[in-house]
Image (cartoon, rainbow, N blue to C red):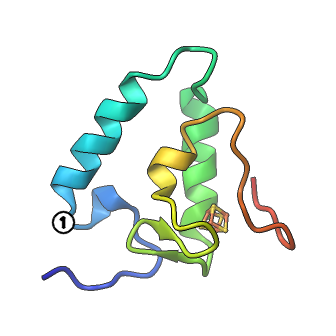
Amino acid sequence: MNRECKKCLLYESAEADMLADIKSRINKLTPQERADDDVYSHRLALCQQCDNLISGVCMKCGCYVEFRAAFIKQKCPDTRDRKW
Ligand code: SF4
């Protein structure tokens, strides 16, 4: 059983299967849909500073942030304090 980890992304936790599934789904995005590497890294760095992140999941939307952040048109779901 994995421990809950605040401020962790999936790649830092032991969620290898889920992370592999997310990477596979990200790789299927078209270039028009996908955030570039710099944007993606910046977004995830902001998530790692956020109190709403628990074990790779955003508590504001229930998404795995490593998936949500890959979509160029997505935004941070915290409407009161949007970080990206
Ligand atoms: S509220 Fe925004 S910055 Fe915080 S974990 Fe969710 S997506 Fe990331």
User: What amino acid does circle 1 point to?
Assistant: Ala
**Is 40 drawn above or below residue 5 in the view shown?**
above
Q: Residue furthest right?
A: 80
Q: Quadrant of residue 71?
A: top right
Query: In the rendering, at what x and y percent does residue 76 appear?
Result: 71, 57
Name the residue at 59% across, 63% down: 47
Give x and y (percent) for residue 43: 62, 50
Q: Residue at x 61, y 23 (%)?
A: 33
Q: Quadrant of ligand 1?
A: bottom right
Describe residue 1's horizontal placement relative to residue 66 as left or right.
left
Q: Secondary structure at mark 1?
A: loop
Question: Residue 65's x, y, as percent?
Answer: 51, 56
Q: Is residue 34 above or below residue 1?
A: above
- At x 57%, y 45%, the residue is 69
Residue beneath the point at 54% across and 30% down: 37
Name the quadrant containing residue 54.
bottom left
Asked whether 5 or 73 is in front, the reply is 73
Please give the residue where the numbered disc 1 appears in the rendered image.
Answer: 14
Quarter of the view holding residue 14: bottom left
Quadrant placement of the N terminus? bottom left
- Determine whether, in the image, residue 4 is placed left or right of residue 57: left
